[in-house]
Image (cartoon, rainbow, N blue to C red):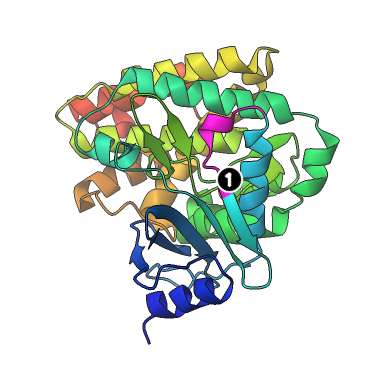
Amino acid sequence: MSEAKQFLELLRRDGRVRDPHAALTPLAGGVSSDIFLVQDGPKSFVVKRALAKLRVKEDWFANVGRNATEQAYIQCVSRFLPGAVPELIFASEQAGYFTMEFIGLDFANWKELLLGGLCRATHAAQAGEILGTIHRRTTGDAEVARKFRTTADFRQLRLEPYLLTTGARHPDLREFFESEAGRLAATHEALVHGDFSPKNIMISDKRMVLLDCEVAWYGDPTFDVAFLLNHFFLKALHHAPADHGLEKMVTAFWRAYSAARENGDARIVEQRLVPLLLMLLLARVDGKSPAEYLTEPKKQFIRDFVGYYLPSPPDTLALLSRVWFAQVFNSTPASNSK
């Protein structure tokens, strides 16, 4: 019996599916979880169950308890931004899955839009406002901090595969990666999505929805900011020499995020942001989750760029952005300007 059929039988036993002709269709993006669209007569919903071993080339294991973490993140954010997360329907703690609203056919995946060259500053600003609001509303919240004591999971899913693995593969930069991993693990300030990536953001004319928040952690909000901006930088490099306006998206996102934080905390984030962003760029080349769309020459461009700038990074996001986009579109060797 196939995995989908086994899952369907489980849903039948739990009373979540009733139509004899109900069907499960695998959804794209299931690297860390089984994700299916369930069609049960006139009803459609999504079911998700975390995997112990992620579907990547290298061995990458993680605690399946992150399934409950994802539900908790959705519940938390829905209290003040209900439209920004899917509606939860049912959860089975024993079987380790939950069901949620199907974000339908009128939504587009943001990663696919960016890869297709549709790069809108308005989308970036919307994401910045949502993320800034989540960070502001959860900063210093003792109850949220208690609920998301998930540093061990964050280490498995982010610090080890992105920072520590990459640092080990670049001995001359290893101290920077190890120091940053230690700093992140010790920082607990706000609710962090942990995978704030365009592939996990769905967009329609009326709504932007965050998905795949199983890495959620009460930690350093800088990680979410750097994680998204990293994708903007990478997509610009992917499209180069064509310029689809991703530099404007960086500016729009940061402006909206800073405004949503309101209390000046964005300045603290920016002080930490540039080194982490540089490390994440290199992690998408030589970590456990490499960007599948980069050619080898563009991967080498990143290695050269990060190798040059990480030991003495620019002071601000604006300075880093200016240097990155100038070199991406002018093909200037990283060692020629700083």
User: Is residue 338 among what the camera can see?
Assistant: no
For label 1, the residue is 176
x, y percentage for residue 297? 20, 48
Taking the magenta stretch, the answer to whether it contains residue 83 is yes
Looking at the rendered image, the quarter that the C terminus falls into is top left
Tag 1, which secondary structure?
Answer: helix
Vertical relation: 6 (above or below) 232: below
- State which quadrant residue 96 falls in: bottom right
Quarter of the view holding residue 130: top right
Q: Residue furthest bottom?
A: 1
Of 243 and 46, the residue lying toward us: 46
Binning the other alpha carbons within 10 Å of mark 1 as few (below 14), some (14 to 19) or many (20 upward) gives some
Q: Identify whether 184 is placed above or below 168.
A: above
For residue 67, side relative to residue 1 (left or right): right
Q: Is residue 214 left or right of residue 40?
A: right
Residue 104 position within the rendered picture, expressed as x and y whole percent measured from the top left: 35, 43
Residue in the picture at 39% in, 78% down: 5
Q: Is residue 163 above or below residue 32?
A: above
Q: Which residues are magenta?
A: 80-88
Q: Is residue 210 visible?
A: yes
The residue drawn where x is 45% and y is 56% is 46
Instruction: Tell me the kind of residue under disc 1.
Output: Phe
Count of labels shown? Answer: 1
Expressed as whole percent of the image width and height from the top left, the position of residue 87 reads: 55, 43
Residue at left offset 49%, top offset 13% = 255
Image quadrant where one finds the N terminus: bottom left
Q: Nearer the viewer, residue 192 or 59?
A: 192
Q: Residue 112, position in %: x, y?
A: 27, 41
Identity of the residue furthest to the right in this view: 142
Would residue 76 be found to the left or right of residue 82 on screen? right
Residue 326 shown in magenta: no
